[in-house]
Amino acid sequence: MRLEALVRANASDVLAYLERRITPRADAADILSDSLITAWTKSGSMPTVDAEARMWLFAIARNTLLNSRRATNRRLAATARLRNELAVSDVAADPDESLAVRAAVVSLQPDLRELVELVHWDGFSVVEAAGILSLSSSTARSRYSVAKERLRAALATADSPAAVRPLT
């Protein structure tokens, strides 16, 4: 009840605070929403004095904003590293082969496609991919076997040089 009254009295001020500090301004509403969720989870530590409770709410908004900025910076840095890695990585000797393989993978059912991508594109073992996908190891091995057979068939019908390359 006190938190609701605090939010009603201060939400527009906290939103204005965030809008002045974030670009694009439209993201301020998302940060406010995250801040209010955090305030709700920490409502047991909300000060009893109104002025202190207002400062507490602003501090939560500030910390949420800082966390969001850090996450954005990490995401941008990872994107830049990926962009650099892709720029220097080897391109397939035959672009048509690469396209045929990608098309075959995309044609798989989503659960099979994710398993193949985790193993071949992300470098996980079948057992590790099973853990990521919350599957038992035996289920993952079985699905991986099915996926390989479907890929072989798709690549064989695509009349691609990749059709003769074995899938491990």
Image (spheres, helix red, strand yellow):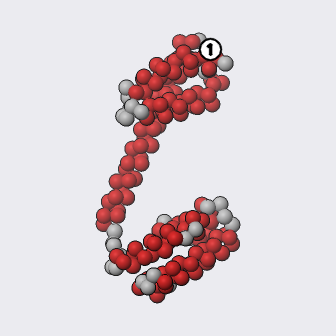
Residue beneath the point at 62% across and 20% down: 4
Determine the image quadrant of residue 141.
Answer: bottom right
Percent position of residue 34, x then y: 53, 33
Q: Could you tell me the amino acid type at mark 1?
A: Thr
Horizontal side of 135 relative to 75 (left or right) equals right
Residue under the point 48% across and 81% down: 155
Q: Residue furthest bottom?
A: 164
Q: Which residue is mark 1?
A: 48
In terms of depth relative to the viewer, which is nearer, 41 or 160? 160
Residue 41 in the image: x percent, y percent? 63, 31
Indicate the position of residue 126 as horizontal and vertical percent values. 59, 71
Dot 1: within a 10 Å radius of its alpha carbon, few (fewer than 14), some, or many (20 or more) residues?
A: few
Q: Secondary structure at mark 1?
A: loop
> Can residue 102 be seen?
yes
Look at 46% across and 87% down and name the residue there.
Answer: 164
Along the line of sight, the residue nearer the viewer: 57 or 45: 57
How many numbered circles are shown?
1
Task: Name the quarter where the N terminus is drawn.
Answer: top right
User: Outermost residue toward the front?
Assistant: 157
* Residue located 34% across and 79% down the image: 94
Which image quarter: residue 17? top left
- Whether residue 63 can be seen here: no
Query: In the depicted view, which residue is nearer to us: 70 or 19?
Result: 19
Front position in the image: 47 or 114? 114
